[in-house]
Amino acid sequence: MKDYSSFTDEQLALQYVDGDNMAFDELLARNQQKLYSYILFVVRDPEVANDVFQDTFVKVITKLQEGRYTDSGKFSFWLTRIAHNIIMDSYRQQRGTHIVEPTEDNDLSNLSSDEVMDINRENEFVNAQVLNDVRHLMDTLPAPQREVVYMRFYQEMSFKEIAETTGCSINTSLGRMRYALINMRRTARLHKIQLNLEL
């Protein structure tokens, strides 16, 4: 029996493509908690999260079996992107909520992600203390804004990685973060929550 612990996720995916079902079991075991946490955080409903999680892995299996995965060294991003697309498709079908997005003329191209989110050690310490309050405030955000904040602060993804995962431009990711912060600060003021998030 193979020892899969030394395999990367990418190697396991390719092993599964070659017919090794045990490799997929290991891949699922490694990724299910992180992926489910991400999905649940975005959709905020365990029943919906379970459905999206199942749909994601059905799609992953299908794509792997069809040979539509190439080892790019970013299996977890590929997985998250599939889940993201499923979530967004379900939101498009519902269209029950109005999502505030930056306008077309809201040009953020002059800002780099480093300038916007250059967090030093002191800021990390301050942020750690307020993340609990931030998490509660994030629940009030529209899904696309909540997702960007979650990816940036909890998964520590760069804006480039967020853009790739969510299939939007870096400017859109930055815009969503900007609106998320504005909305969270407004909610914090409304509820008199002391929020000193250092960005």
Image (spheres, helix red, strand yellow):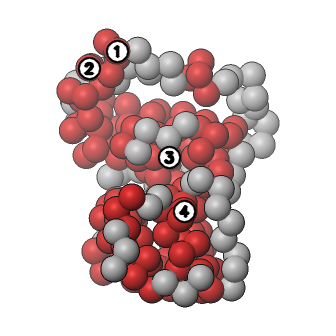
Closer mark to the observer between disc 2 and disc 3: 2
Sequence-earlier tag: 4 or 1: 4
Q: Quadrant of residue 92?
A: bottom right
Furthest toward the right, the residue is: 105
What element does badge 3 sit on?
helix
Distance from Cα at disc 1 to Cα at disc 2: 6 Å
Distance from Cα at disc 4 to Cα at disc 1: 32 Å
The dot on residue 121 is 1
Q: Between 128 and 29, which is closer to the camera in this rendering? A: 29
Check the image and report above or below for 79 versus 134: below
Which amino acid type is marked by label 2? Phe
- The location of residue 40, given as percent across then percent down, is 34, 65
In the picture, which quadrant includes the N terminus?
Answer: bottom left
Which amino acid type is marked by label 3? Val
Q: Which residue is mark 2?
A: 125
- The location of residue 86, given as percent across then percent down, is 55, 74
Which amino acid type is marked by label 4? Glu
Distance from Cα at disc 4 to Cα at disc 2: 34 Å
Check the image and report above or below for 191 versus 142: above
The dot on residue 135 is none
Q: Quadrant of residue 25?
A: bottom left
- Whether residue 52 appears in this view of the structure is no
Check the image and report above or below for 151 versus 55: above
The dot on residue 148 is 3
Residue at point 71%, 46% (across, down)? 169
Q: Between 133 and 106, which is closer to the camera in this rendering? A: 133
Residue at point 59%, 53% (across, down)? 73
